[in-house]
Amino acid sequence: MIMAGNDNPMREVRLEKVVINMGIGDKEDTYTNAKALIEKLTGKSAIQTRSKKRAPEFKIRKGQVIGAMVTLRGQSASDMLKRALDANNNAVYESAVANNSLNFGVSEYIYFSGVKYDPKIGMMGLNLNATFSRRGKRVEIRKRKAARVAPEHRNIAPEDIKKYIETKFGAHFVARE
């Protein structure tokens, strides 16, 4: 249990979810490889992401499959975040923390422990986005009797996220060179 300065349990920072994303660009044939890799790493079924608008400079049309992703919650999210931090040698850039989240990438999937190179998949990297929240978030998003939550409670300071990551996962933050 990580507290943000005082002993109020409502101020506890919690890991809400981890989203794993792999972009494939205009190469639709690599989608099956990206989906297989995400399923191999997480054990969950990946979904396809589609472009919302066309980008002719990247040869992308509207509605084209441009990636694969999966959302993890609970213990599986915590386990995946721990594995991804280990794959990055427990080092994360300080600039990776923003807006109640931590965003970083793993350049090659072979850095994950227990995962071997698969020639069918090739070399691919992936992005992770970990979202953090505090107790009471549901008050604002529930359908019945929704109420406003104060910005001081809703917005988590980057220092609190760094403290959570350092104590719970043993990672450290480094400045960009």
Image (cartoon, rainbow, N blue to C red):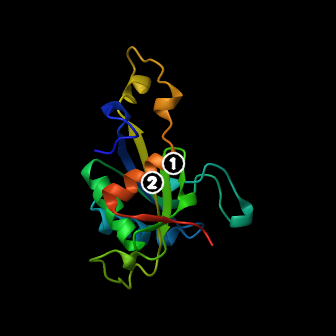
Residue 46 visible in the displayed image: no
Task: Indicate the amino acid at tag 2.
Answer: Lys
Query: How far across and how far down the image is residue 47, in percent?
Result: 41, 55
Task: Identify the residue at the far right of this view.
Answer: 57
Q: Is residue 114 left or right of residue 55?
A: left
What residue is disc 1 on? 158
The residue carrying pointer 2 sits among few (fewer than 14), some (14 to 19) or many (20 or more) residues within 10 Å by Cα, namely some
Query: How far across and how far down the image is residue 140, in percent?
Result: 44, 24
C-alpha separation, residue under disc 2 versus residue under disc 1: 6 Å
Q: Where does the C terminus fall, quadrant-wise?
A: bottom right
Above/below status of 151 relative to 104: above
Residue found at x 38% / y 82%: 120
What residue is disc 2 on? 162
Query: How far across and how far down the image is residue 171, in percent?
Result: 39, 64
| Element at label 1 | helix
Q: Where does the N terminus fall, quadrant-wise?
A: top left
Foreground of the two, 21 or 177:
177
Residue found at x 51% / y 36%: 155
Is mark 2 in CB contact (under 8 Å) with mark 1? yes
Task: Indicate the amino acid at tag 1.
Answer: Pro
Above/below status of 58 relative to 140: below
Residue 86 visible in the displayed image: yes
Above/below status of 134 relative to 146: below
Tell me where residue 172 sits by quadrant. Answer: bottom left
| Element at label 2 | helix
Residue 38 numbered mark, or none: none
Foreground of the two, 102 or 44:
102
Number of numbered tags placed on the structure image: 2
The residue carrying pointer 1 sits among few (fewer than 14), some (14 to 19) or many (20 or more) residues within 10 Å by Cα, namely some
Query: How far across and how far down the image is residue 99, in percent?
Result: 54, 44
Above/below status of 97 relative to 176: above
Foreground of the two, 143 or 173:
173
